[in-house]
Amino acid sequence: GIQVEQSPPDLILQEGANSTLRCNFSDSVNNLQWFHQNPWGQLINLFYIPSGTKQNGRLSATTVATERYSLLYISSSQTTDSGVYFCAAPYYNNDMRFGAGTRLTVKP
Amino acid sequence: KAGVTQTPRYLIKTRGQQVTLSCSPISGHRSVSWYQQTPGQGLQFLFEYFSETQRNKGNFPGRFSGRQFSNSRSEMNVSTLELGDSALYLCASSLADSGGEQFFGPGTRLTVL
């Protein structure tokens, strides 16, 4: 099955700094999603990005499907950006395989 | 449009008991998937239902089962609970039958004592 790897596992930033999170996947995909898990455990959709680049405020994402990776950019980070970020890709039908996550801590 | 809802949000059970969790997808979504999240294993796929049929099943014992109703609502059941079943159980719904954007509910946090 598809393998999804995320890096770095942990990231500590000062408020206002920029960051890049990476997601590598082992096989071609027709879907790639980025999520932010809030402190209560819910996965919040950030991007549905099988290929190309999308932007939403201070966040943007790029997926290069031919090279099997996706990047999530966070600019001017805020303390509310803290939490765990996951990427996920489908294995079969809607069976999504998740990376282990990147735990982001933004310090004031 | 209402999001994915899950009930109950929190549950405490003892070993050997059984539990049923419920998930109501976004209106119009026919695919419902279930995931288990634990600190040690991360997010793992349990099973997926589409139009009342289980299409895929993850690598979990037969104690884990589920079903989907004609209105797309889904339930999962865990019988003979073990301590290791303590986890956050998340369900997701999707409009597409494959590769579509997944939307997650708030989860049910199960504690087995």
Image (spheres, coloured by chain):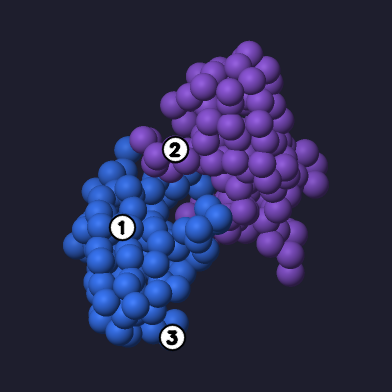
Chain colours: A blue, B purple
Q: Say which residue appears at 62% left-offset and 54% top-offset.
A: B105
- Can residue A14 be seen? yes
Q: Callout 2: residue from which chain?
A: B
Q: What residue type is labelled 1?
A: Thr
Q: In which quarter of the image is the C terminus of chain A?
A: bottom left
Looking at the picture, do discs 1 and 2 lie on one chain? no
Disc 1 target residue:
A102
Locate residue B86, reporting x and y percent: 53, 31
Q: Report which quarter residue A104 is drawn in.
A: bottom left
Q: Which chain carries label 1?
A: A
Residue B113 pos. (x, y %):
58, 23
Residue at screen point 66% across, 26% down: B13
Q: Which mark is residue B38?
A: 2
* Label 3: which secondary element: loop
Q: Residues within 10 Å of mark 3 (few under 14, many from 20)?
A: few
Identity, as a three-letter code, of the amino acid under mark 2: Thr
Mark-to-mark CA distance, 3 and 2: 31 Å
Query: Circle 3 sits on which residue?
Result: A57
User: Which quarter of the image is occupied by the N terminus of chain A?
Assistant: top left
